[in-house]
Image (cartoon, rainbow, N blue to C red):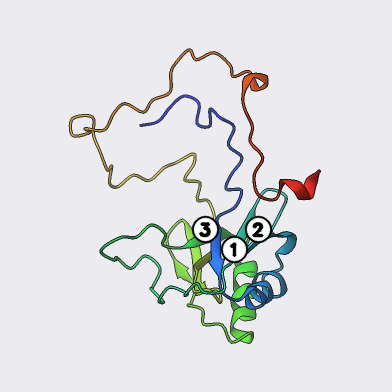
């Protein structure tokens, strides 16, 4: 289940998850004013608009403003559901316990419900929701915890004997991709950067 090259495509991290909001003003107040993300891009797409909030040059969160979208019901983070479902919560890492407690204080001060600090053994976490009822976790590492170097695998989901899915391993000797031979199609927002 592990490969020699842990990141063969040089994936740098999550660039942005994209959500929908019926109220971009509340969304801006939460993500920019309270959490300190920077609004770095917004543009019209005909009947909708898209907004990008950056925490760094590597991580953003995006919202489509859809006036008729309904926020999902509140659901506790990690609470099991049945039926069609795809997203549970979005987690952000903080540097220290002081940062975590400081954010918890800011959320309380802003009248936004937030949990007590939860000790998960490898991280300390608090849980809350943004104005669009997106379930959020903020966490900081527990001292001396390094799951990348020292994984803790108490349950392995599949074994070779019961795996009926096709082999998804990468080809061992695939030639390098020549990007000059690839087609790139213009998409929404490109006109703002010409």
How far apart marks 1 and 3 lie (CA) works out to 35 Å
Q: Residue 171, percent across and down?
A: 43, 18
Can residue 116 be seen? Answer: yes
**Residue denoted by label 2:** 45
Residue bearing mark 1: 64
Q: Residue at x 36, y 65 (%)?
A: 78
Q: Is residue 12 above or below residue 94?
A: above
Q: Is residue 140 visible?
A: no
The image position of residue 112, as x and y in percent, is 56, 82
Q: Check contact, mark 2 vs mark 1: CB within 8 A.
A: yes
Which structural element holds mark 3? loop
Of residues 54 and 65, the one nearer the viewer is 65
Q: Residue placed farthest to the right in the image?
A: 194
In this figure, which residue is indicated by the disc labeled 3?
A: 142
Q: Residues within 10 Å of mark 3 (few under 14, many from 20)?
A: some
> Mark 2 against mark 1, which lies toward the viewer?
2
């Amino acid at each position: 289940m592990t490969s020699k090259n842990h990141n063969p495509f040089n994936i740098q991290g999550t660039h942005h998850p994209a959500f929908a909001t019926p109220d971009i003003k509340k969304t801006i107040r939460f993500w920019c004013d309270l959490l300190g993300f920077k609004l770095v891009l917004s543009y019209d797409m005909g009947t909708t608009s898209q907004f990008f909030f950056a925490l760094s040059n590597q991580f953003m969160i995006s919202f489509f403003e859809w006036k008729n979208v309904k926020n999902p019901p509140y659901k506790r983070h990690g609470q099991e559901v049945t039926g069609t479902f795809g997203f549970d919560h979005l987690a952000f890492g903080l540097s220290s316990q002081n940062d975590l407690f400081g954010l918890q204080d800011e959320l309380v001060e802003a009248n936004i419900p937030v949990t007590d600090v939860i000790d998960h053994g490898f991280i300390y976490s608090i849980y809350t929701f943004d104005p669009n009822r997106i379930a959020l976790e903020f966490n900081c590492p527990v001292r001396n915890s390094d799951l990348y170097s020292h994984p803790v695998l108490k349950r392995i989901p599949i074994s070779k004997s019961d795996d009926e899915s096709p082999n998804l391993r990468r080809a061992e000797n695939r030639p390098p991709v020549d990007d000059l031979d690839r087609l790139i199609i213009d998409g929404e927002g490109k006109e703002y950067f010409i």
